[in-house]
Amino acid sequence: MALFEAVQGYIDRKRSLGVIFERAAMDLRAFAKRLGDVPLNTIEPEQVLAFLNGPRTSRPTWRTKFTLLKHFFEYCTARGMLETLPMPTNRPAVPRAFVPYIYQKTQIRCLLSKTRECQRLSTCSIDAPTLRMLILFLYATGMLVGEALRLQRDDVDLKAAAITIRGGRFNRERRIPIGADVRSRLKWYTSSMNRRRPQATRLFANKDGSPIRARLLVTSFQRLRRLAGLQRHDGAIYQPRMHDLRYTFAVHRLSSWLKQRANMNRMLPALAAYLGQVGLGYTERYLLMTPERFRNQLVKLSPLCRKGRRWCDDRVLMKFLDEL
């Protein structure tokens, strides 16, 4: 099989699984354009390395493209298109501490207040009510940006106050409850959407009813962040991101439970299930980002700090997980 056909088949496969594959698709097409429509079995590691060593390519970008091409060639090998992977040696990872940004509630209110100014131009594909609702929705549910953008109108059950999330990275489906405030806002928003763009099938759509692209949304959010005057001064590489609303949701939720002296042995697994995370290790990271005044309580409450014990050893906890 030729390279162009294999690349398009791989992209179509990813998108059929609900994966947002925009940047990766661009990189794969750039790789195919550089090599030409050659047979797959003629590609050599030196050609792959020449593509990876392109101008102004940082080490993290190099490794990201390497992983993308490796997965593409593994896909081709599994389907009998290739016998061996034409991959060069990977570069070693550069250790880098990444600290998510945790928004304060006043900052979130500031973001919401600036949406009209941010989207005032007629050339903006996303209108102000949609951008405002998206920010509020992500903060209130902890949902991934891609999960929110893939939501269909039928996925929102306002009567039952629940949302069905489909697809995602592991092609799993989960149903999460929503609070009364979120339900009320969504009811107003969906009624407004039905009047303004009845042709749209997605819950969050552009002015013309078409699906919102993740990259366009990120660009709009960064413009909004600058208008709101939100900026990091802690030496971090990244400025506050839209994805940080997920971290903010988790940390604010944990802080609230700690104030209420809730049983964290039960609440942490519940939070993991709500966020759709594979293991408790992902959720435990949020404990380290909670306010300093809660640290002593966390040392006592978190099973992570009990030497010789694991989550799966707690029978009460495992019974609770089975009932989620």
Image (cartoon, helix red, strand yellow):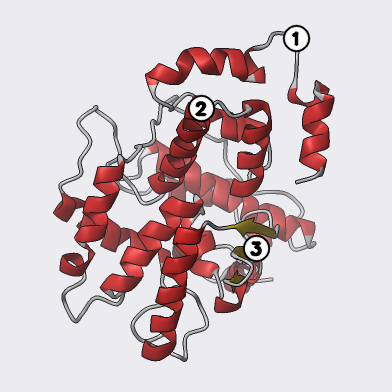
Between 211 and 115, the residue placed more toward the observer is 115
Residue at image point 65% right, 63% down: 167
Residue on which the image places disc 1: 308
Image quadrant in which the N terminus is located: bottom right
Tell me which residue sits at (34%, 37%) in the image: 101
Where is residue 124 drawn, in percent x and y?
A: 24, 75
Q: Earlier in the sequence, mark 2 or mark 3?
A: 3
Could one spot residue 51 in this view of the protein?
Answer: yes
The secondary element bearing badge 1 is classed as loop
The residue mark sitting in front, 3 or 1, is 1
Report, in whole angstroms, how far the alpha carbon at label 2 lies from the one at label 1. Answer: 24 Å
**Total marks in image:** 3
Q: Which residue is mark 3?
A: 167
Answer whether labels 2 and 3 touch (C-beta < 8 Å): no
* Cα separation between marks 2 and 3: 32 Å
| Residue type, numbered disc 2 | Leu
Residue indicated by mark 2:
258
Separation of residues labelled 3 and 1 (CA atoms): 36 Å
